[in-house]
């Protein structure tokens, strides 16, 4: 029977603990990624309660946002919000959530 040195035993124990810590961290990180990606595409609440026959067109929303200095790359109406993907005045990518009844920016990410 081979003898196991106390160093090898300690290395095995600490190695297992490190592996468990890394695994728990990786799982937590993955869960955080899933949660944030679920929120990334939408504001999570409506921008207006007004019926959609009172909404401006996507083109009108885009024009209003561009008048504020943004360069709109993509625009759509989703969950009672105008969602516009644009570049700000500094060239940074932003996601704008716009009230479809008046074109005012409700939130920006």
Image (tube, helix red, strand yellow):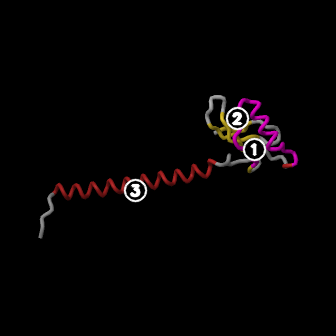
Q: Earlier in the sequence, mark 2 or mark 1?
A: 2
Q: Earlier in the sequence, mark 3 or mark 2?
A: 3
User: Helix, strand or loop at disc 2?
Assistant: strand
Q: Quadrant of residue 84?
A: top right
Query: Which part of the image, by quadrant, shows the C terminus?
Result: top right
Pick out the residue farthest to the right: 53
102 shown above or below 14: above
Real-space CA distance between mark 2 and mark 1, rounded to the nearest whole angstrom: 15 Å
User: Helix, strand or loop at disc 1?
Assistant: strand
Q: Position of residue 105 (x, y in %)?
A: 73, 36
Of the residues tagged 1 and 3, which is closer to the observer? 1
Q: Return the mark for residue 93.
A: none
* Label 2 packing within 10 angstroms: few (<14), some (14-19), many (20+): many
User: Helix, strand or loop at disc 3?
Assistant: helix
> What residue did someone put label 1 on?
82
> What residue did someone put label 2 on?
71
Real-space CA distance between mark 1 and mark 3, rounded to the nearest whole angstrom: 40 Å
Write the start and end of the magenta stretch as one range: 53-77
Q: Position of residue 73 (x, y in %)?
A: 69, 41
Real-space CA distance between mark 3 and mark 2, rounded to the nearest whole angstrom: 42 Å
Residue closest to the eye, 21 or 34? 34
Query: Residue 4 in magenta?
Result: no
* Label 1 packing within 10 angstroms: few (<14), some (14-19), many (20+): many
> What residue did someone put label 3 on?
23
Q: Position of residue 34 (x, y in %)?
A: 55, 54
Q: Quadrant of residue 87?
A: top right
Residue closest to the eye, 85 or 49? 85
Residue 12 as seen in the image, left or right of residue 53: left
Q: How many marks?
A: 3
């Amino acid at each position: 029977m081979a003898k196991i040195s106390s160093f090898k035993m300690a290395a095995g124990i600490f190695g297992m603990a490190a592996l468990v810590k890394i695994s728990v961290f990786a799982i937590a990180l993955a869960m955080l990624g899933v949660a944030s990606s679920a929120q990334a595409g939408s504001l999570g609440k409506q921008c207006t309660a007004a019926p959609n026959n009172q909404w401006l067109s996507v083109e009108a929303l885009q024009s209003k946002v561009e008048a504020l200095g943004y360069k709109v790359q993509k625009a759509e109406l989703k969950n009672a919000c105008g969602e516009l993907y644009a570049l700000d005045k500094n060239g940074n990518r932003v996601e704008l959530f716009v009230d479809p009844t008046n074109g005012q920016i409700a939130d920006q990410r």
